[in-house]
Image: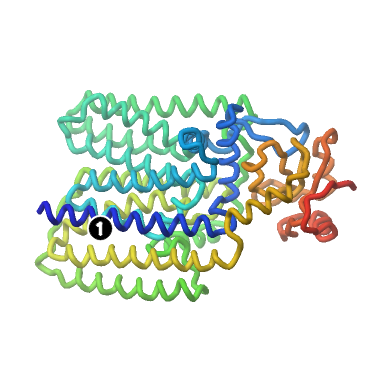
Amino acid sequence: MIDRTLRNHAIVVLAFLFAFALVTTKVLLSENGYVSPDGTNYLGVAANISAGEGPFVSNDGRGAAVSTYFAVWPIGYPLFVAGVAKITGSSVFIASKILNLILLAGSMAIVMRTFSQNGPILALILLFGGSLEIFSLSASEGLFIFLLMLFSMLLGRLIDDDESAGPGVFIALLLAGIAIFLTRYIGLFVVAPAAVVSVVLYARGRFLSALFLLAVAGTIGLFAAGYLYINQSMTGFATGMERIPAPESPAGFLKMLGIGIVRELVFPIASWEPWETGQNIIFAVYLLICGVLAVFLFKAGNDTVRPALSSRQQSFLLVGLAYFGAIVLARWLSQFDNLNYRLLGPGTVLITVATFDYLLAAFPRRRTAISAFMVVTVGLAFLDQARLIQEARRGPTFYQATEEREARYRDVPDSTIVIFGDMHQRYLRPDLHLAFPMTRPYSAITEDWSSFIADLDSSRDLFIDGQAKASPRLHESAQRVILNMQSEHVHRFSQ
């Protein structure tokens, strides 16, 4: 047994190291370094925190071009990035990648600790395609997954009537819940599963534990209310900006949700696109192994058992499903990105871990087949990462692109407003004010060029990035300006 345990742990460690190499290579070879538009804001705040300027960012130059309190997203992820940057002496970009890989390893360790015998094979779920993409990005979802894993593990200990679950567990749950909210506003949803478990504990006669857990849920809610109140007083909005109602019809929303769920079920690929030949080869092999596993499980016959859900399975499912419901409801009510692997992924990981742990218990004589399915799926995910690396090699590397970005903006004066500014300047040059006309569906209107220019701080010099693209979302007047002023340079703008 010891030899098997050591072997399984060794396989997981080797798989993580291979994933580490793939992700690092992919990130550094890609032109954008896997820094999304949201990520540039996070890194910009982290850069200012590291510089001792606090959680503030340069605004978009409207009204008065000033530094404003950052509230569009919570401060948790930038704080962690700034902390790693301070400790390692690295840039916020490198710090975000170091942090994400630590969080990936930490998430796998939580699964291995929580599910003991099945832990090593279940930890491989964090190396599926969607998870690898999440932990590649300089964004908050990796930290969010790690904290949800921790919260679920602690909640499972309470459900399990664990005698060792003393006051420390409740304090840890409180801190984890607050951290989850500080990572993403949607994290407030953890109040719901905590309240549900408190009711369950009360029904079992564990009145003191139920009361403590209810107090944890209430304290998280009060902390969130206080944080949102500060946001409101500092920015005029509880979450730092006006939230636009979702534009989709019910049918359109259901279609988007359905596509998102189907893509989540294609475990080796983060975002399966039917027209991508390279992806379809991986998809075809994945369908084949799904079919083989289904046959093995179907033929199990009398070998099948019907175990009750364990406390750990219950907690992971409860938190995963609660998150899934919360993010779908939030997207139904307001406009933000489509329901993709970044938004659905945190729930998918938790639900998948619990589901496969149940399958391993329900089909004890099919353990080898289930384990083989997991290993092959991870192998296919690695193949997809290799495909992404090949795609990244066709363009400049991140550092080559960064040198070009820095050279293009070298002569731009400090604290200038740059129209259509390069998003990476948010952390390369946090002093700059990057300005863009408002467009639907992320704003209530599609702003014409004259209104946009009139709204900018007239006391500041205006520059325009000549490499801007004439997006069809822009007002036609803004598109005309872009087409007339395209160049390789960032130059002074005048009407």
**Residue 265 visible:** yes
Q: Mark 1: few, some, or many residues within 10 Å (few <14, many ≥20)?
A: some
Identify which residue is drawn at 51% across, 27% down: 227
Residue 197, position as x, y percentages in the image:
28, 36
Q: Is residue 399 above or below residue 189?
A: below
62 with respect to 389 (left or right)? right
193 with respect to 207 (left or right)? right
Identify which residue is drawn at 57% across, 35% down: 239
Q: Is residue 374 above or below residue 275?
A: above
Q: Is residue 322 above or below residue 306?
A: above
Identify which residue is drawn at 34% across, 66% down: 379
Residue 480, position as x, y percentages in the image:
83, 59
Q: Nearer the viewer, residue 370 or 259?
A: 370
Label 1 secondary element: helix
Instruction: Count the marks.
Output: 1
Q: Nearer the viewer, residue 274 or 302?
A: 274
Q: Nearer the viewer, residue 210 or 490?
A: 490
Q: Quadrant of residue 488?
A: bottom right
Q: Quadrant of residue 56?
A: top right
Identify the residue position indicated by label 1 in the image: 11
467 with respect to 76 (left or right)? right
376 with respect to 416 (left or right)? left
Q: Residue furthest right?
A: 495
Q: Inspect the image, locate mark 1, and give the three-letter code of the amino acid beneath it.
A: Ile
**Residue 356 visible:** no
**Which color mode does the image show?**
rainbow
Residue 199, position as x, y percentages in the image:
27, 33
Residue 447, position as x, y percentages in the image:
77, 48
Q: Quadrant of the N terminus?
A: bottom left
